[in-house]
Image (cartoon, rainbow, N blue to C red):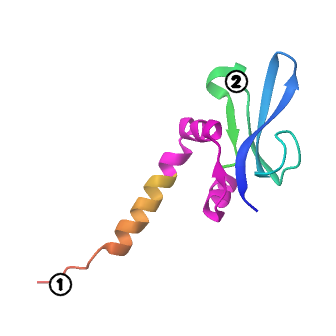
Amino acid sequence: MAVKIRLRREGRKKTPMYRIVIADSKAPRDGRFIEIIGQYQPQLGENAINLKLDRVEHWMNVGALPTDTVRSLLRRAGVLKARHETRLAAKLQSNAVALPEA
């Protein structure tokens, strides 16, 4: 079962509101999903994205892949940069060699 992080459209006609959900890749766009991890309201401008950051991290660590649109939203929210920095720091920490005391 391939799991995706993607948008699910809600809201009225001409006023879209999207939920960011975890869903099976074979499920329809507005069909079954596993968990809601946030929402995106494009008409709000600056405060358009609300995310549960801990759940986003959990699902990305488990192997869920974001769609292109969700990836750009996560990048705009700063999630991908923070994830990259923490993974890079852990990698550098594991590769660090202790210097002998003089």
Residue 19 in percent (x, y) is at: 78, 38
Residue 84 in percent (x, y) is at: 46, 53
- Please report the residue visible at 40 percent of the width from the left and 67 percent of the height from the top: 91
Q: Which amino acid does label 1 sit on?
A: Pro
- Outermost residue to the left: 102
- Please report the residue visible at 83 percent of the width from the left and 55 percent of the height from the top: 34
* Residue occupied by mark 1: 100
Q: Is residue 44 above or below residue 21?
A: above
On screen, residue 101 versus residue 34, left or right, reads left
Q: In which quarter of the image is the C terminus?
A: bottom left
Q: In this view, does 92 lie above or below 4?
A: below
- Please report the residue visible at 64 percent of the width from the left and 21 percent of the height from the top: 45
- Outermost residue to the top: 14
Q: Which amino acid does label 2 sit on?
A: Pro
Q: Is the magenta stretch mostly helix, strand or loop?
A: helix
Image disc number at residue 45: none
- Outermost residue to the front: 26
Q: Residues within 10 Å of mark 2 (few under 14, many from 20)?
A: some
Q: Of residues 2 and 35, which is closer to you in this image?
A: 2
Element class at badge 1: loop
Return the disc, 1 or 2, that comes first in the chain's sequence. 2
Q: Give the range drawn in magenta.
A: 54-82
Q: Of residues 42 and 30, which is closer to you in this image?
A: 30
* Residue occupied by mark 2: 42
Is 69 within the magenta?
Answer: yes
